[in-house]
Amino acid sequence: MSGTVLKWAAWPLLLLVLSIVSLRMGVTGASWADVWYSLGHAPQGQAGIIADYRLPRISAAIVVGIHFALAGLIMQIVLRNPLADPTIFGISGGASLTIVSAMAVSLALVPTDQTVSASTDYIPLGILPYIALVGGLSATLLVLALSWERGPGRGFSPQRMTLTGVIIGAILNAIVMALVLSMSEASTELAILWLAGSLYARDFSHLLPTLPWTLIGLVAIVVLSRSLSALRLDVHSAQSLGVNLRLARPLLIVVAASLAASGVAIAGPVGFVGLLVPYIAKVIGVRQMSYQIWVCCFIGAALVVASDTLGRIIAAPVEVPVGIITSLIGAPLFALILNRNLRS
Amino acid sequence: MKFLRSAMLGALLFTPHAYAFPLEVSDDRDGSFTIEKQPERVIALSNFAADLMVALGKEPLAVTTYEGKRPVYLGGSIDKALDLGDITAPNLELMAKLKPDLTVGLLRYNGPFEKQITAMGHFLAYHTADVEKSRQNVANLGTALGHAEETEALNRNFDRLRAEYAAKAKAHGKAPSYLFIWSFHDTFYAFQDNLMSAELLSDLGARNLVGHNDKVRLAEEAFKILDPEQLLALNPDYLLVFASHGGPIKANPIYQRLDAVKNGRAYSVGYQYSQPSGPIARELVIREGAHLLFPDLFKAPEMPDAARAKQLVFAE
Amino acid sequence: MNDLRHPLVIAATLSAGIVVLLLGHLQIGALHTSLAEAWQLLWNDDGSNTAFVLHEVRLPRALNAVFTGAALALSGLLIQIITRNPLGDPGLTGVTGGATFGVALVITLLQPATWTVVSAGVLGGCVAATITFTLARGGGFRDIQMVLSGVAVSIFFLAATSALMILERSSMQSLYYWMIGGFSGKGWAEFAWLWPMIVTAGLLALMITRMLQMLLLEDAVARGLGVRTGLWRLIGAGLSVLLAAAAVAVAGPIAFIGFVAPHIMRKALDGDRKSIPLSILMPLTALCGAILTLGADFAALALPLGNRAPAGVLVTLFGGMTFLVLARQVMSRQSS
């Protein structure tokens, strides 16, 4: 019994320790006392800096990590491919496209001789998740529509969904690039920074509008966990378990899309998280579906927190965006995993 | 009379300016706010702000850097200021730790992060565009810093310099043609007269071959992208190139056909030309620009050697 | 009716189109020339600026577009054969990401001389593709493993490029327009590098069409016929990478020509995917890619789109739309 508790409790504990260490690390030095006081009431000095800047940022990192990891988990199971990830599937591309378009539109609408009232990125923060969702879901629907197969093999084959997704993702990324490069120079620089996947200046006002989506996503994935679990089996076994495949697959993909898109709304497209995390979970031997969901949440959060902290300290005072770190770490890790995958 | 005037001005300079505060200020954002007392701890996120502060003899607490380097044309005056990184993402923790009274930045880069910056202290954000805006910004920021008279004097001196140089250049009846180009590898942005550097050079009586853009909304959009053939078709007498990475620019056979290159009148100019809205930069652009475009009429100005224009070289 | 589908007719039409566009390229530019003038000056260099521009700017630019387009189309065709999937695109091997990073590295750390930029691009592309192949070798190159490995490798190199751009902001500015793709400012210096690589790879590809044709069969069948599928896949993939790397190093990461050209040709030839002999499909695809790219560049020159539409944008938009139209048809034709 205590073995089970330990199994489940180990992960949040890991994340907690990592977060506390991350609170301590940064370009302005801090002590453990500062970290302690930052969590209290009205922190001053260095503790105040931790409370104002690192605490919200790490919270955002945790949420982003959860979103992308779960999205990746769902996609890998539904698409039957251990190499699926929202950033290459087109979900992030779609979300990015709508957000960048909105940036372009809002900047164009700002009258020159007048001023700009505050809102980060010139777009009201509350709307950002919805903009991202529209884009992400549209891209997903496009992929689903294009991969719908008529005739004898009715439904969505994982093969076709994957390949369509990759191509659509590539198209969307190309369009985003073209759009970004056609904006004025300053906006282009800001857009490129955003597209790298960044937690710079993120605080609770970025996080709170997204939390409902976190909740919805988590509830949905728990409710659908039986179907998800069944989808890991081959088609016939799944059907014999009474799972409606034709419904479950697209539904789950939509859940993945919402999670990924709302993650994009906070930090932009942070790559590789969805790809790696479920695989790490599998490699360390996680089998049971509910446990897998649990573990993925925490590993995802830990990965993003660690990457963000690394990005904050390696080139100080300049920050390396978290999306770049996850991509750069992710690739060699991914290579290792792939080798193992092929060998087994 | 002149002595008395200078004495009075001198007295004014040494008078504490606290009487000017509290001060109602507004910048290029919506609305206005009150600065209670003269700002002592100031962060200059933009070159314009750092420039103005150096001109006023003040030291900013922190500045942003471009590729890790401070603007060379300011000499060593801001070497002691803390490096906050790039202006597109200045390090917020370092800024907060400094507890600034005032942070000055650029609207287009720092505006989106207004909330975070105003949480630390007052924030002034400016658009930079042309000469008139530069005068306004200098006056506005100077007043906010409690140095209204000095900045007024700075603006007056600037106006005088412009007029003086323009008169001298035009008196000799020369009207050389030029192009001011920001080169990005294969792509050339030719500045039109809406942009300050070109405006200053054209004021001297030189002809900007891409002229003025009457249709554009924002000054920062007033440029033309030229391909090599267009460059040859325009064939300016003088070619001023700002190579953002410094060093040689990509070679192209077109260059050897350009009169400017053949006559040794193609120059690689310093960083101060890219956005010369600060008092030191704008004066340097006029003085050095005049020397480059009218070498017989104007001598090379006193300035840090590293910021001087050099002959344009190409990477083979 | 069958005549329209005849390969020679198509080849002739495409070639004629290329010649027309080439002449159009020679005529268009800031130094106005009529067609007759351009033709005259082409053969008689009279030392004027116009003649100079014709020989040193317009002609090489057009040639770069032609060869780049042909290279990308061929590269895409090879990938589609090797992965046995009609949704293949040269970028799937990760070569575009690698080439971009190579160029970014040189522009940031060294001087932007043509030879360093192009060779760094080619090298970067080849390195990236090699990593992809190494990662995917277990799956025999045709699985989704290869596709997704390639994309992951691309993401890695693009992230590395982003890191460079963010740490050295001047590189961000220099890479703007390079990354969107285009032929402005590309001259004989680039072409001198481009044509040997393209011609060599193209000829090699033509020489091995028989082997590549075998790869379209089921692996078991092919091996039964004594074909070493793994080896030929590798060779084909290598040629695809070289072609794409050269093209991207010169013109930037232009998407989609590689994907779209083979399909356009297949539709034009109106045959089942497996029944069109590669010895016919390959040269036609190359011609198709050439004309598409040349056309996009011509449109970029001729249309009054002002600052904002280098060839790369037009290619992306056209390719994107074409993909969407073709995708449904391709999907329904593909045996599942």
Image (tube, coloured by chain):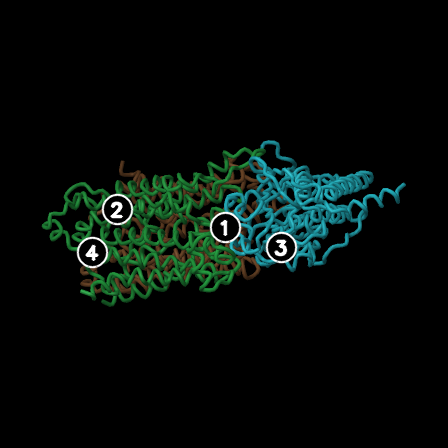
- Disc 4 versus disc 2: distance between alpha carbons? 17 Å
Label 1 or label 4, whichever lies nearer to me, is 4
Mark 1 sits on what residue?
C178
C204, C126: nearer the viewer? C126
Q: Are marks 4 and 2 on the same chain?
A: yes
Q: Nearer the viewer, mark 4 or mark 2?
A: 4
- Look at mark 3 in the image and give the residue it sits on: B61
**Secondary element at image label 3:** loop
Disc 3 is attached to a residue of which chain?
B
Which residue carries the number 4 mark? Answer: A289
Badge 4 local density, few (<14 within 10 Å), some, or many (20+)? some
- Label disc, if present, on residue C312 of the rendered structure: none
- Where disc 1 sits, the SS reads helix
Q: Which chain is brown?
A: C
Tag 1: residue type? Trp
Please, which chain is the residue tagged with disc 2 on?
A
